[in-house]
Amino acid sequence: MSNLREPAPEDPALRILMADYQAGSVQAFDRLHDALAPDLRAYLRSLTRDAARADDLLQETFLQVHRARAAHTPGEPVRPWVFAIAKRVFLMDVRAAARRTRHEQEQQASAAVATTADHLHTRHRVESALRQVPADGRRAFLLHHLFGFSFKEVAAKLGIKPGAAKIRSSRAASFMRSLLREKRDE
Amino acid sequence: MSDSRVPSARAYREAIVGDLAPVRPLMKPSRRVWLLVPIGLLLAATAPFVNGIRGDLSPYAPLLTWGATGLQAIFGLWLLALGFREAVPGRNVSWPSLALAAALTMVLVGAITVVTNAASATVVPAGREWRDWMECVVWPALIGSPFMVIATLMAARAFPTRPAIAGALCGLSAGVLSDAGWRLSCWISDPVHLAESHGFAILTLTAAGALIATVLDSRHWRRLRRS
């Protein structure tokens, strides 16, 4: 663990900023963010060894800190509190990634069985039909049916409501079905 | 990771700023423990006041009756303090401390049992094993449940990073407090009975605390991801 970046010593000003943030001050949030983000990013990079992923997790950490801000006790150190949440965000992400990998492996295993010429032909037809599906629906359809995300997760990724994700995916599926039917009939 | 996974830097700042309302911060763990002290003491006193105190210990009272119960109750509240501390992100209790807490629980409850048994050895009458076992599992677990639920809910509000451990400590605290009172009502001193039934009730409350905290935590994360 020696290569992991340790949190810097606590600055007493952070506790005041945290109290102001809890009181609803935007400036306090911005200053808190500026004070913590560089070290947090470095910490997350040391955990993930991936700059892009660390940046994603940094944003996720601040969102979680925001949701949990009432849980911070005034006067208590801020830095260890935020870093502990960052580590939890990282661990939850690792868990989610492991779930996704498992799902993808299952998909690959089932796909490997279907490698006959017929299947390749079908795949070509599906891909060509997929290209014709409107982009919004295609995204929801692929995230749900190919990558295995729940509609709630799909909705979170696309910034829409779960109901809308379900409708988009369902419309895309219907559209695909009609296209494939047409091609079969040709 | 794609951009769709997490909103852009500006979007997430806007999301936070748009949601920035004043919040009421949580009290210090020690103050939250003090809030639960009266309920904890009430819990430890419930069984003796409702069911009465076993009469065979009177020559040794009050040290062996309320003295040992008080000691066990104080220890239960210390476990609660440990649980509340564990629940605060960045203030996790170390594994040696957790092992020490578990060992101390066994040593204290075991020592009180042995001393009580030495003062007045009573065993489970033949044919009543199952009934007495059930009674000494169900009642302490039922009496300790409200405290366990309240303590676990309070711990979960602190956003614990190891919810199962925080919840288990709250459940253990409820179990020890409940047993502190129940030991005065149960007239059996046999260490085997105490290990099998009283110990099982404590373990049940510990497991229930861990389970509730874990469920609350996963609900919390699901809600956070949705919002």
Image (tube, grey):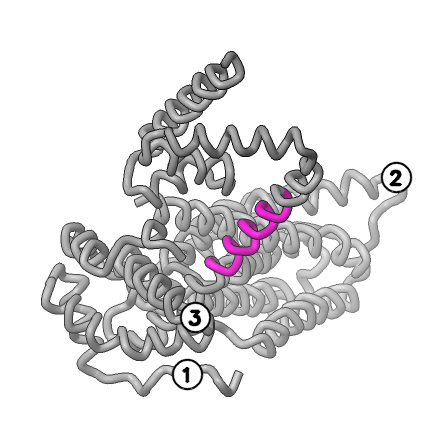
Disc number at residue A5? 1
Q: Which of marks 1 and 3 is nearer the N terminus?
A: 1
At x 51%, y 55%, the residue is: A97
Amino acid beneath label 1: Arg
Query: Which residue does the image show at 38% across and 59% down from the upper left?
Result: B159
What kind of secondary structure does the magenta stretch mostly adopt?
helix
Of the two numbered discs 1 and 3 in the rendering, the one whose residue sits closer to the viewer: 3
Q: For the residue marked with disc 3, what is the amino acid?
A: Asp
In the image, what residue occupies the spot 56% across and 69% down?
B71
Nearer to me, A118 or A104? A118
- Which residue corresponds to mark 3? A50
- Between B201 and B119, the residue placed more toward the observer is B201
Chain under callout 1: A
Quickly name the residue at label 2.
Answer: B127
Judging from the image, what secondary structure is the residue with disc 1 in? Answer: loop
Q: For the residues marked 1 and 2, what is the alpha-carbon distance in whole angstroms?
A: 63 Å
Q: Which of marks 2 and 3 is in front?
A: 3
Q: Which residue is depicted at the point 67% across and 61% down?
A: B58
Element at label 2: loop
Q: In this view, does A24 lie to the left or right of A130?
A: left
User: In the image, what residue type sits under mark 2?
Assistant: Gly
Respond whether the residues carrying marks 2 and 3 are from the same subunit. Answer: no
Q: Which chain carries label 3?
A: A
Q: In which quarter of the image is residue A137?
A: top left
